[in-house]
Amino acid sequence: MSQQAKSNSNTMNIFDRLAKKLQRDRTAKNEDYLQFNYIKDEVGNRLSDRVYDINRKFKVGLDLGCGYGHVSRHLTKDAVEELVMCDHSALVLKKASIPEDTTINCRKMVVDEEALPFEPGSFDLIMSSLSLHWVNQLPSTFSQIMKCLRPDGVFIAALFGGDTLYELRGSLQLGETEREGGFAAHISPFAAIRDIGGLLNAAGFTMLTIDTDEIRVGYPSMFELMEDLKGMGENNASWIRKLHLHRDTMFAASAIYKELYGNEDGSIPATFQIIYMIGWKPDPSQPKPLERGTGEISIKDLYRLDEVVKDATENLVKKTAKEVTHAFEDDDGKRR
């Protein structure tokens, strides 16, 4: 057995990476590919806001799985001086929008997110928007990102969470069970928010910030939703996916979707759960927690926190008033 085959046998392969690359290549061949980017553009805009929330100018940044430049287009020289945009699909990368601020030194590279080719300590900032949910070995990718960061470098990312498209998943399962007596996986599995913190910690990241958001989009029916998912390149790419859905099953699932989740106006909602994460590579200059036993308030006094704060405030006011009084007195004890 070759070394590569041995490596593959020890890897949890959930997704067909070649199929996903071909799916994304097809999106780039569509003349109207831009009209399907509304979810990724919105998340990219929100992720770029998190970059600007950090009061720092980064020297070298990486946009990992950049897609059509959903994050990079919003960056300016105030955020990053040099930017590397990379994606698994060369066709998508070719059409990716570079930053509107042309003073940024920007270059593009075709890179597989599962095998980063960069030298250790290459970047101060690594970003990834709605790309890593298609990676087979997320712990390995997180570890590689950690190695590519310089000390005190930051990793900022967004990916789809486990509640994404729960309406579509449930409707397809019920429709297929009704018409065919069983169901297959039609929606790819997504990471749960409870797992992300553990994975980042295991990779060595510190000072973690993880939060979640939901974007709900209305569609005329289930068929328009599935068409848009295909246009985004977000159709199913798991190895166990079913390649064909019967016509009757599709109509049954669509009817179930409207019955269970439909809006009053006849449209149907689709939920996209977004998990945002920020993690830092450890560095001695970073803030550290106080040593055990140095706290001034005991946990057992938390129930009387309002009282403690009130007493501390009154003591501070008295101390300040006394200092002000002394400042206005002469050496003879008389007021000026």
Image: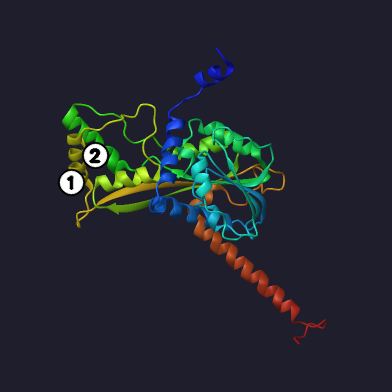
Instruction: Choose between 224 and 306: the one closer to the eye.
Output: 224
Taking the spot 60% from the left edge, 40% from the top edge, the residue there is 205
Q: Residue furthest top?
A: 1
**Left or right, residue 245 beside residue 59:** left
Q: Nearer the viewer, residue 116 or 262?
A: 116
Q: Quadrant of the N terminus?
A: top right
Q: Residues within 10 Å of mark 2 (few under 14, many from 20)?
A: many
* Left/right of residue 31 with respect to residue 78 in the rendered view: left
Instruction: Give the camera-side residue of 137 and 295.
Output: 137
The residue lying toward the viewer, choosing from 297 and 51, is 51
Tell me how the rendering is colored: rainbow
* Residue at the spot of label 2: 171
Q: Residues within 10 Å of mark 1 (few under 14, many from 20)?
A: few
The residue tagged with tag 1: helix, strand or loop?
A: helix
Task: Give the distance between the C-alpha atoms of the residues marked 2 and 1, in whole angstroms.
Answer: 10 Å
Earlier-in-chain disc, 2 versus 1: 2
Q: Position of residue 34 (x, y in %)?
A: 42, 53
Q: Quadrant of residue 122?
A: top right
Residue 6: mark = none
The amino acid marked with disc number 2 is: Ser
Q: Residue at x 56, y 36 (%)?
A: 142
- Asked which quadrant contains residue 327, the reply is bottom right
Of the 4 image quadrants, the one containing the C terminus is bottom right
Q: Which mark is residue 259?
A: 1
- Contact flag, marks 2 and 1 (Cβ < 8 Å): no
Residue drawn 52% across the image and 38% down it: 88
In the displayed orientation, state which residue is furthest to the bottom.
336
Which SS class for mark 2?
helix
Question: With respect to residue 192, does 102 lie above or below?
Answer: below
Provide residue 208's location: percent of width, then percent of height. 56, 45
Residue 101 is left or right of residue 239, and the answer is right
Residue 53 visible in the picture: no
